Image: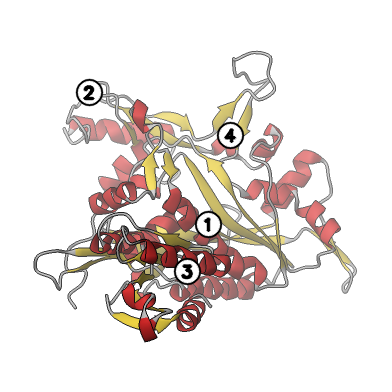
Amino acid sequence: MEKNTTEVTMEKIVSLCKRRGFVFASSEIYGGMAGIYDYGHYGYLFKENIKTAWMNQMLYERDDIVALDSAIFMTPKAWVASGHVGGFNDPMIDCKKCNSRFRADHILEEAGIEADKATIEFINKELQKLKDAKKLVCANCKSVDLSEAKVFSLMVKSNLGSVTDEVTDDNVTYLRPETCGGIYLNYKNTMDSMHMSLPFGIVQIGKAFRNEIAARQFIFRTREFEQMEMQYFHTPGSTLPLYESWKKFRYNWYIEYGIKPESIRWYKHDKLAHYASEAYDIEYNYGSMGGFKEVEGFHTRGDWDLSQHAKYSGQKLEYFDENTKEKYTPHILETSVGLARLFLMFIDSAYTEDKTNPEETRVYLAFHPKLAPVKLAVLPLLKNKEVLTNAAKDLFIRLRKEFHSVEYDESGSIGKRYRKQDEIGTPFCVTVDFESVEGDTAGSYTIRDRDTGEQTRVTEEELVAKLRAALQ
């Protein structure tokens, strides 16, 4: 069977996601908002399945991890302590003709000029050199009339609780730019209430917000997103073996859910934050974006986060070791992954074109069954035959009680229904036909495999066993 002979493009994925109810542009009837997306029915189900798969590994399969759901709003002092208020920004330039915005450091890096952590003065000096050499033009309209670079804060501000609409230094609050802050602030509460001893971790899934200069590449980089992360508190000196163990643990999760080893790789950061001793990313080779991009980050953070919050809050965040009778500030390692990046990665990886029929290219999403938004579709062969629709609905009700993500569909021809289920990634379709309700074959059904298209006759007992095996 000839598959994936056509390039997986972003255009194909965006089209499928909208057509089949995975992802919509937010406020689309008003023209949309850049970098903001809504998730439709199948997108919601798919996201929840990814979360469940992640939580199963990170929380339910371990004895050293507890969960947290911290608030989006935190005291502004916490973001001062973490360095976000003073340093969470990017250099930005504007096109004066078409009003497009660009990351100035990215422009310099594309020109071969090192700009990581460069001052705004250095960036503007290098940009002027490119202008003088006529090498600086707007990527959208090709205008040369570009502004100087200026500092652009990535923090999204709010006037929560203010009696005025104006956001000032006195009433400003922030929508969190990352979710780990809530974990650090709840380290002591969690340790005391759950009676945790080192090493232990806290996992959280939650929304974060960033005022991105240029949100692009569909849902890969957005202004509102969900993070899935774990902060692991441990004894100073035990970081590296724990770090290697967590890297292996998380890498195996990708393989378990169908990502091919050749499609992911480790990227080691040479330039580290001042508190870090190691930093790696898992990168996935997005066919839709033409190369490897970051999906998940692994960082050693030392004791910097807890020390900063202890300093600014005045609270002691030390740990008393009952064995050594010592007090110390725990060190932290983290894994952090964007849910939307996983969402896009799994669709990119699963997108398949089957060209065995020269008259039609069949598109299907070869999801791992546990991730598929719908696990089984129950289809009456004909919608105008009550004996078939009644039997199909009865089977649907019975199966839904155990497997939940089961869908009943009688709209359109049986072929079109198969194509729809293929495109949303449903691993199995079961068809109720006349043999299902008549004679010696009554109570048997035709089950169709998404990936191979093969159809076999099964009893309800065999159907249930097949589903259970696929979802174990």
Q: Nearer the viewer, mark 4 or mark 3?
A: 3
Q: Nearer the viewer, mark 3 or mark 1?
A: 3
Q: Secondary structure at mark 3?
A: helix
Residue identified by numbered label 4: 86
- In this rendering, position of residue 390 left or right of residue 138: right
CA separation in Å, label 3 and label 1: 25 Å
- Cα separation, mark 2 vs mark 4, equals 30 Å
**Callouts 2 and 4 close, C-beta under 8 Å:** no
Secondary-structure class at tag 1 = helix
Which quarter of the picture shows residue 176? Answer: top right
Q: Which residue is mark 3?
A: 395
Q: Residue at x 47, y 69 (%)?
A: 395
Mark 2 burial class by Cα count in 10 Å: few <14, some 14-19, many 20+: some
Residue holding disc 1: 48
Mark 3: few/some/many CA within 10 Å (<14, 14-19, 20+): some
For disc 2, the marked residue is 145
**Which amino acid lies under the numbered mark 1 shown in the image of this protein?**
Glu
Horizontal side of residue 86 vs 237, given as left or right: left
Q: In which quadrant will I find the N terminus? A: bottom left
Between 153 and 64, the residue placed more toward the observer is 64
Question: Marks 2 and 1: which is nearer the front?
Answer: 1
Residue at image point 45% right, 72% down: 257
Q: Earlier in the sequence, mark 4 or mark 3?
A: 4
Which numbered mark, 4 or 1, is in the foreground of this view? 1
Amino acid type, mark 4: Gly
Find the distance from the CA under tag 4 to the CA under tag 1.
Answer: 35 Å
